[in-house]
Image: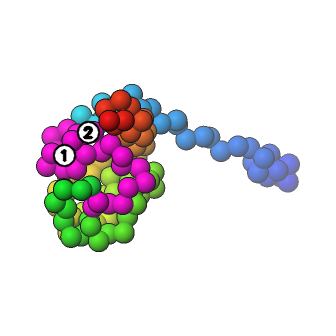
Amino acid sequence: MAVAGALCIGAAAPAAAAADASRGEQIYNRCLACHALAGDRVGPRHCGLFGRRAGSVPGFDYSPALKNSGIVWNDETLERFLAKPLAVVPGTTMTYDGVADARDRRDLIAYLKMAGASAPCAK
């Protein structure tokens, strides 16, 4: 019995599936009704998203809730916000209910990172 316990302790947990930016690009198509990479639409642009303070794109009219949220966009804050935007920032004008599937969120975040380094965002 002690040997079985020792074997379980030494066993590695399965690694989480690697994020798939190509799949994330397909998921980003859902966002295109309101967002674009390099320009503002109903929602703000996504170029320069990582490391940016929420509610800070110059000239974009954000809700006071998002401007005052104190969020700085990174993997963790995007993960939480994309899961349930209205719960994370009550009063946000982003009315999208969120991306329910954790894999979809992970892939979408990977795409946003990759796209942030792409030619449209380098301008």
Label 2, residues with CA under 10 Å away: few <14, some 14-19, many ≥20: some
Q: Residue at x 41, y 50 (%)?
A: 50
Q: Position of residue 85 (x, y in %)?
A: 28, 59
Disc marking residue 38: 2
Q: Is residue 41 magenta?
A: yes
Q: Position of residue 70 (x, y in %)?
A: 36, 69
Magenta-span inclusion, residue 90: no
Amino acid type, residue under disc 1 in the picture = Asp
Considering only vertical position in the picture, is 94 above or below 40?
below
Which residue range is magenta in the image?
Answer: 31-56
Asked where in the image residue 113 lies, by quadrant, the reply is top left
Q: Quadrant of the C terminus?
A: top left
In this image, 4 relative to 53: left or right?
Answer: right
Circle 2: residue type = Ala
In what element is the residue under mark 1? loop
Residue 30 seen in the current view: no
Q: Nearer the viewer, residue 47 or 21?
A: 47
Q: Residue furthest right?
A: 3
Image coordinates for residue 31, horizontal then vertical, percent: 23, 41
Image quadrant where residue 14 sits: top right
Q: CA distance from mark 2 to mark 1?
A: 7 Å
Tell me what residue is drawn at x 16 percent, y 60 percent: 61
Residue labelled with disc 1? 40
Density class for disc 1 (Cα within 10 Å; few <14, some 14-19, many ≥20) is some
Q: In this orientation, does residue 106 appear?
A: yes
Q: Looking at this view, is 109 or 51 the one in front?
A: 51
